[in-house]
Amino acid sequence: MLKWLLVLAVIWAAWHFLKRPSPRKPRPAGDEAAAREVLGVGRDADAAAIRAAHRRLVSSVHPDRGGSAELTRRVNAARDLLLRDPELR
């Protein structure tokens, strides 16, 4: 009985280890043009315009509203990249 519990514990641990998501690959930094294209804002957009565009897009591409998680990640990454600029804060 103890042998079977040990086998099940090892199988359970291995299964949880293998189903763990792989770490994300870092995105190339500084692709500001692509981020602006994703959000649909121009070069002259300020922080408020970037936040408004992000809010508008996330409300339509969020998985809870029929969108996909990948699109939501792209929109969030674009916002983070553009708002990282100290001039826009």
Image (tube, rainbow, N blue to C red):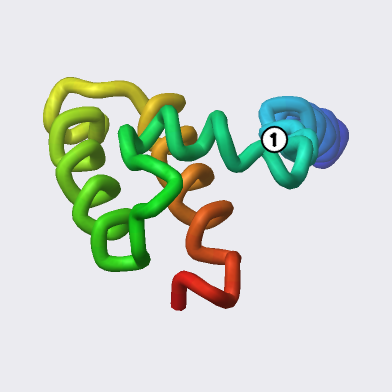
Q: Is residue 89 above or below residue 65?
A: below
Task: Decide which of 11, 45 is in the foreground and name it.
Answer: 45
Name the secondary structure under disc 1.
Answer: loop
Q: Is residue 39 above or below residue 44?
A: above
Q: Residue at x 28, y 48 (%)?
A: 54
Q: Residue at x 35, y 63 (%)?
A: 46
Task: Decide which of 82, 76 is in the foreground and name it.
Answer: 82
Q: Give the amino acid at mark 1.
A: Arg
The residue carrying mark 1 is 20
| Quadrant, the C terminus | bottom left
Report whether 10 appears left or right of 39: right
- Image quadrant in which you'd find residue 57: top left
Total number of numbered labels? 1
Report whether 85 appears left or right of 36: right
- Image quadrant in which you'd find residue 34: top right
Q: Residue at x 52, y 45 (%)?
A: 77
- As drawn, the residue found furthest toward the front would be 44
Residue 1 visible? The answer is no
Where does residue 17 sit, x and y in percent of width and height? 78, 36
